[in-house]
Structures are given as C-alpha cells and as structure tokens.
Image (tube, rainbow, N blue to C red):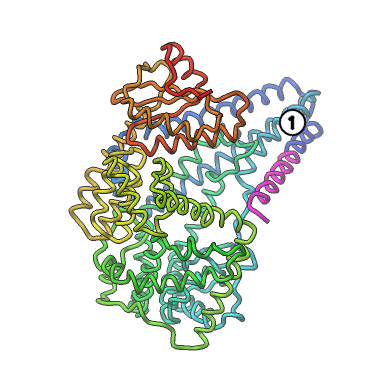
Amino acid sequence: MSMKTKEIIYTILSAVCAVVVITAAIVAGLFLLPEFPSLWIPLCVACLVLLIACAAVNLVGLRKFKHRFDNKTAREIYNYGLEMQKSVEEDFKAAEREAHRKIGQGNAWLALLIVLTVLLFVFLGATRAEWSALAGIVGAYLLTGLFENFIVPSEKTPHRLFLSAKEYPLIFAQVRRAAEAAGCHRKLRTELVSEGIGVREEGAEICIGLDATECALLTGGELYAVMLHEFAHVVNVDTARGRRFYRARRRWVERRDDLFSAVASLFLSSFAMQILFASETYRMFATRHHEILADEKVIELGQSRAFIDATAKGTELSLYNDLPQRETSYDCYEPEEVPQDLVSRDLKTFFAYREKYGEMWRKIMREELPARVSTHPTLRQRMEKMQVSEYDDSQTESDEKYRGEQQKLLQFADKMVCEFLRPQYAAVREEAYISRKEQMEKYDAAAAEGKELPLDEQVLCMQAFYGIDDEKAMQIADKMLEKDANAAYAHLYRAKIWFDRMDERCVEEFRAAMRSNRDLTDSCLDHIGLFALRSGNEQLLQEYRSNAPELSQEAEDRSAATHWKKGTELRDCGLPEEVMGEIRARIGEISEGSILRVYAADFGEPACTAIAVEMKKRVLPAEQARLMNTLCAYLDSRSEDYVLYLYAGKMKAAMEEMSLQPFYTQKQ
C-alpha cells in the first residue's frame, strides 16, 4: 500500500472518529444534561470564546517565533547558530529536556483544544437547539483536523524486505553476538535497507537495517564491530530518543496537506514550529556527541581496529557515492528492460573507482578537517580517539559460507531494486538515458557540421556530458568562456569536474560562477566549504567561514532587488542592440508561431531587465509553459540579469504606461 493511500485511509479514520465524538457529545448533552438554556448557552459562548482565544494565541505565538528570524542578516543567523551550538554543547541534557518539554506542551495544547471542542458540543446539545446537528458539521471538521495529529500512518518496512536468521545465519550471528556484548537484550529484527547499516526502534523491536553493498564490503569481524557501535546507541537510549523526536515531527510537522490543513494552521502551527526547532536543534548539535559515546563501547570491548577498518570502507563508499558514475547513472539504463543486477553492478563499479580514485580518497581521509556541524566524527578523529594509527581497507572475508551469504544478500537486493524500479522504469530511463543521449548526440551533430548551439542548449549539453564524458563537457565550457568570460554555467561545470578530482582550481571556478549568477551562490559556497574540509585547507576554511554569510546575503539582496513589484519604476532597456539581437534570434527559434510580441524594460540599480512575452490567443497552457521555460533557461544562461513575465496584469499595465514598443514581433 502506498503512503498516499495510507494517508487517505487515516484521514477517513480521523473523520469517522470526529463524527462519532461530536455526535456522542451532542447526544450526551441532549439526554444527560437537564434543560437549562440560561446556563448552557453562556457555557457554549465561553467555550467558543476560548477556542477563538486559542487560535489567537497560536497565531501570535507563530508571529513571535518568526519574528526572531525576520529581517536578520545571514551573518546574524550564522552567529545565532553559533550561540545555539554553544548552548547545546554546554548541556546536552538541558537541550534534550527542552525538546521534550516543547513536545509535551504541544500535546497538552492539543488535548485542551479537543476538550474545549467536545464541551462546546455537549453544552450545545443541552440547549436543544434545532441547528445543533448542522453546527456539528463544523465541529467534525475541526476535530478531524485535530485528530490527524494523533492518527498518523506508520512507515513500517514492508515484510518482503525482512531478513530471516534462517536464511542468513552467519550474518545474523554477528548481529546477535554484538547485541549481547553491548548489553542489548531486546527482540531483534533485520531488514534490507539502502542507506547504510543502522538501528532504530519500532514498537518493542530493535530493527537492524543492513545495506547489501556495505555488508558485502565488510568482513564478519568488521560487521560485528559496527553492530557493537549501533547497539551502543540502543543502550544509550539514542534510538528511543530518536524515535520520539521522529514521531513528533511526523505528527506536528509532516502533516498531510489536505482539506483539514487549515485547522492545523489556525490552532497548531506555533507549536509545530517550536517542536521542529527544538528537536532539530538538538539533533543537529548533539548527534556527533552521541556518536562519540557509542564509539566508547567499541573501545571498551577491544574492537577499535576492526571498527576503524570498517569505517574506512564506509567512508570510501560515501566518497564514491558523491561522484557521478557513468556506469550506474547512465549505461545501466540502456536496456529497454529493467536491469536485474543494479546493486551488484554498483558494487563492481565501486571496486573499479576505488582502484582509480583510492589514493585521492585515502588522502582525504588522512587530511579531512572536522566540520563545525556534523553528525559524525571524521575518520581521523576516530583513529586518534581509539589510538589506531593505520587501517586496512582491502581485507575480505575468508569464510566461504559467510561470503555465500554476502552474495545471497546482494542478489536479494538486486531483486528488490528491480521490483521497485519496474513500474517506473520507462520514466527513469527516459530521464537518465534517452533524453541525455539525445542531448549529447545533438551536440556531436552540430559540432560535425561546424554549427554552434544556442547558449541554453550548450548548458544542457554540458549537463548531459558531465559524469559521462567530462572532457567533452570541459570543451563546451572552454568554448563558452572564450565568447563570454562571465558564462556562469561554464564556470560551474568546470568547477564540478575539478571538485570531483580534488583539484584546487575548482575554488576559483565556483567563485566565478556565483559572481556571474547569484542563484548559484549557496551551492557554490557549500562546495567551497566541503573542498576546504576534504583537502585539509585550514586557511581556505577560515576564509570560507569569514565570508560565506556576507556572500550569501549579497546574493539574497540582489535576488530581492530583481523582483519587480507594482510601483517600481520601469525605464527604457539599456542593453546593447547586439545583446537584444541575440535574444530576438533565440525567441524566433523557439516561437513556432506562438509568441506574438516581446517587450523589454529595465528597473532597479544595478539594472535588471524585465522581459515580457505576449502569446498568441489559444496557445495551450502546456505549450505556453514549455516556451516560457525554454526562454527562461536561455536568459539564465546569459551573464546579464533578467526576470521573465507574461505580458499581462500589472507588468503589462506598467509597460503600456511607458508606451513601450516590442523588441520582437512575429514575422508575418
């Protein structure tokens, strides 16, 4: 059953419960309370006033919460984050109590709202008013929105992904042995996952998630050491805490967007924001602390070296997953039928990439600096803590039977991925392979004829070649930069390619990309910060931390300045005719007779150019969207600042007031 179907069922269940409760409340008031209107009517009014007051308190609380962050600069937000981190790290227990207190307050608030609603309809039933049943519809609506906070669909692992001890006795023996050694005596359940080895609590059970690829890399002894660490999280109540916080976020924050969402917005939104903030603040700044505490169990039981070896392999797998991989993101989707070995193929590709990039990865693991905020210590930090001076990432399991179980688990993962992918394979193949192949062929055909594709097409070609043929992507970027030194996406893809190779030239390319296109700023800054960490470059890291908030703020301010609003003065477009001619030519290429006229005007300082497109009548919405998206991509690939509109509404009125003439008119 899909999650969407579950949500519909649970919404219906919430509605049924609400109708039953409201009906019972009205009937109880009608038959159990005496006929005394002069008492019940004032009590109805009092309950209604209290509900209105609750809504007002919620909205005021939400406004006050948001006001803490309104109009703050990026630097002020950054400094606030540092203060919050310091506060959490000074007293983890206090931060945890604060998160639990917010959840408790939210639950009490929700209970109060339900009680007031029920009392309102009990008293309403006691008035014997003929319209009480009609009012009950409103009450059922309100209660449904409140009950949706209690009745939340679970996200249990499908049974078909469970792994039995009978099928995998040797792997499960390592898991059970680690649980006993760590002092975890709970009921265990193993299941196949795709995001790494881990544990979580689900009801009375401890669920152990086993990633087939990672299990295939680890020896039995290394898996035992990893599971010691994971079960230490159970003993240290990290999993229990995580489950409580997860359930709170599911109830309060990840609510269903449906007909009853207005109830949550009116009565619960303030508590939802506070619960999210408190729990996420704790999780963000305390997770690494809990990882360090779990590591102590590994040290205590003398499994430090095996754990470091396993962590090294896991780190390499993570670095591999960060790289674009032609074999698993493109080549594997060439067949028209779903590949049967995607997980096994991914493991083989990992080994090939480790052979190619192993030295680079080992250099990263030797030199990587700890991030200010991270969920885990670096490998180097763990090695220092555990007093392990070296690791061996080449060890493989020697027991043939154990290796047989590893292979069996890989085959099971292959089967499950194939089963999951089959219904959507055509769409996945279209995006990952067919459209990408067509784009690359379009570039090759134009190059063979000595033609140059439009800028937006060149960007799409770079995007298609990236990770498939990086040299070809680099050639396109170089040619774009020969014509325009500020071509943002040319800088961006050069930077990405060099970043993947840990080439320090990527830093200047990221800087050039975000100087030319403010929308790339946050992504480029993230990459620069990550490069500084991975390369162990303290100077670059300090520079990044010193400048990143201001650079992000500049981009945000410039983005705000390029949003035209009614009343903002428009002036004649100041772009050179050469530039307007290029834009005019591209519009002519994509128009296909649908674009009638196009207008341009400048506003703001520095200037941003508003482009307004007038479509012919009866152009279908889908075609209109396609044309606007294509033109937007073209304008975005240029180094000037543009904002695109349909020639309608306030923008049309402002341009008509200027008596503006179109710079493009459809040829007759």
From the viewer's side, name the closer residue of 359 and 61. Answer: 359
Q: Is residue 245 left or right of residue 619?
A: left
**Does 273 sit above or below residue 463?**
above
- Corner quadrant of residue 36: top right
Magenta range is 1-21
Horizontal and vertical percent for residue 372? 29, 53
Residue drawn at x 57%, y 75% is 411
**What residue type is disc 1 on?**
Gly
Q: Is residue 18 left or right of residue 652?
A: right
Circle 1 residues within 10 Å: few <14, some 14–19, many ≥20:
many
SS at badge 1: helix
Residue 488 included in the magenta stretch of the image:
no
The number of numbered badges drawn on the structure is: 1
Which secondary structure class fits the magenta region best? helix
**Does 514 sit above or below residue 500?**
above
**Does 514 sit above or below residue 176?**
above
Question: Mark 1 = which residue?
Answer: 136
Residue drawn at x 49%, y 25% is 613
Residue drawn at x 55%, y 69% is 192
Residue 11 included in the magenta stretch of the image:
yes
Horizontal and vertical percent for residue 586? 44, 34
From the viewer's side, name the closer residue of 154 and 351. Answer: 351
Horizontal and vertical percent for residue 438? 50, 52
- Corner quadrant of residue 19: top right
From the viewer's side, name the closer residue of 351 and 525. Answer: 351
Seen from this angle, which residue lies furthest left? 539
Horizontal and vertical percent for residue 660? 42, 15
- Corner quadrant of residue 323: bottom left
Residue drawn at x 47%, y 57% is 241
Q: Quadrant of the N terminus?
A: bottom right
From the viewer's side, name the closer residue of 412 and 601. Answer: 601
